[in-house]
């Protein structure tokens, strides 16, 4: 009987070892499709942002108004970056009123269906404001889908 008990104990022990080895493999095999899907989505988003940046940069630099010059778009990871040059007098106003700048820009971003679509796909819209000619930084504003859900 002692041999039978020892055999069963040894058999159980080997099964436990096999289970411990299989568990990480099983978890890894379950995680890989999700990682691949996320990677594919990120790749597709990156390609979409590159297309948008290229199309949106056609004709730049261009004046948005007498104080702001659109220098074009670039992509940084999942961020679509709009580079904007601002006249010094307007730059001072922007520095004095950062909340107003953010809220006015949010109205513009969230009111644009195309931009909201990009946000819903995981993109971040980043606006880089710098002074005209000197390129001295003024402000950076980022918008995510949650910013338009408020």
Image (tube, grey):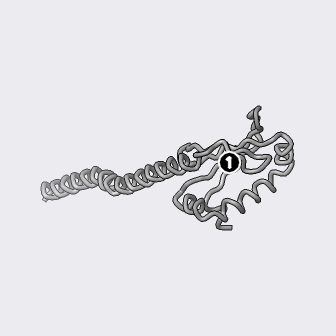
Which x, y percent locates residue 133? 76, 33
Q: Which residue is mark 1?
A: 127
Which x, y percent locates residue 120? 55, 62
Residue 111, quarter of the rendered image: bottom right
Indicate left or right for 139 with 34 as reference: right
Indicate left or right for 103 with 149 as reference: right
Front-most of residues 57 and 76:
57
Image point (27%, 53%), residue name: 22
Image point (72%, 47%), residue name: 63
Front-most of residues 138 and 71:
71
Front-most of residues 136 and 11:
136
- Figure check: 46 above or below 122: above
Residue 149, quarter of the rendered image: bottom right
Q: Secondary structure at mark 1?
A: strand
Indicate left or right for 8 with 139 as reference: left
Count all numbered tags in the image, as a single digit: 1
Image point (58%, 50%), residue name: 56
Which x, y percent locates residue 145? 60, 61
């Amino acid at each position: 009987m002692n041999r039978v008990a020892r055999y069963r104990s040894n058999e159980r022990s080997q099964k436990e070892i096999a289970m411990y080895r299989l568990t990480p493999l099983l978890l890894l095999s379950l995680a890989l499709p999700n990682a691949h899907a996320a990677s594919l989505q990120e790749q597709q988003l990156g390609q979409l942002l590159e297309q948008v940046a290229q199309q949106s940069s056609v004709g730049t630099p261009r004046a948005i108004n007498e104080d702001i010059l659109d220098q074009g778009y670039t992509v940084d990871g999942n961020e679509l970056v709009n580079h904007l040059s601002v006249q010094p007098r307007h730059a001072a106003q922007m520095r004095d009123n950062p909340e107003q700048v953010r809220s006015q820009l949010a109205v513009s971003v969230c009111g644009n269906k195309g931009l909201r679509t990009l946000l819903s796909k995981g993109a971040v819209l980043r606006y880089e404001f710098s002074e005209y000619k000197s390129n001295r930084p003024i402000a950076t504003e980022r918008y995510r889908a949650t910013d338009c859900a408020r």
